[in-house]
Amino acid sequence: MSDATCPAAILPLRFLGDPVLRSKASRVDAFDADLRTLAESMVASMYAHHGIGLAAPQVGRPIRLIVVDTGEQRDGSEAFALVNPEIVEQEGAVTGEEGCLSIPGIVAEVERSSRVRVRGSTPAGEPLEIVATELLARVLQHEIDHLNGILFVDRLGPMRRRMALREWRRRRTRDEPAAPAAGA
Ligand SMILES: [Zn+2]
């Protein structure tokens, strides 16, 4: 059976408390079929979990691979994967609401650079450079943080971080279903 007839797998998510989310992800050296399959499965998983971005550690793979789709279509036409992404320029500062698929149900205002230039590769190994503003800039910064073991709650002030983590624990204990917020 060819890969084209297999729908991409929906991968289970890892949640706050899982050590893989705190590890520094390794650089990708092999641009092979496994990497492309993982990227495709991550795009499918991002849609299945109603996310606008997903980093490989969030599906238990500590490698430097992210997928993003901040578009309206949600059919793969606007999704892209970025391997070994690096922020090479950043400027400005803007505060906006953020959530994370690994901390479902928690949203908070986070300050990010308003414009970033990100350099990386496609899963096929082609160089890819993106200049982003607005939501795309925010998602790229959020996902690249994941590759360095950083979660968005780490970027809150101490009091707001405590409140967010308390709310997270409360939801986990009661096993409340998370409202689908724009997580990444
Ligand atoms: Zn996240």
Image (cartoon, rainbow, N blue to C red):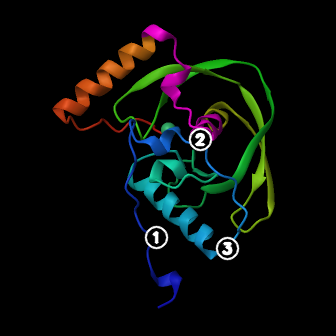
Q: CA distance from mark 3 to mark 2?
A: 22 Å
Between circles 3 and 1, the one closer to the viewer is 3
Apparent side of residue 9 relative to residue 66 in the rendered image (left or right): left
Q: Position of residue 12 (x, y in %)?
A: 37, 56
User: Which mark sits nearer the N-terminus, 3 or 1?
Assistant: 1
Q: Position of residue 59 (x, y in %)?
A: 46, 53
Q: Disc 2, ligand 1: is the CB inside 8 Å?
A: yes
Measuring 54% from the left and 52% from the top, which residue is drawn there?
56
Label 1: which residue?
A: 8
Q: Disc 1, ligand 1: is the CB inside 8 Å?
A: no
Label 3: which residue?
A: 32
Measuring 73% from the left and 63% from the top, which residue is drawn there?
29
Q: Amino acid at mark 1?
A: Ala
- Residue situated furthest left in the rendering: 174
- Say which quarter of the image contains residue 36: bottom right
Apparent side of residue 129 relative to residue 65 in the rendered image (left or right): right
User: Which mark sits nearer the N-terminus, 3 or 2?
Assistant: 3
Q: Indicate the secondary structure of the residue bearing disc 1.
A: loop
- The image's mark for residue 143 is 2
Q: Indicate the secondary structure of the residue bearing disc 3.
A: loop
User: Which mark sits nearer the N-terminus, 1 or 2?
Assistant: 1
Q: Amino acid at mark 3?
A: Asp
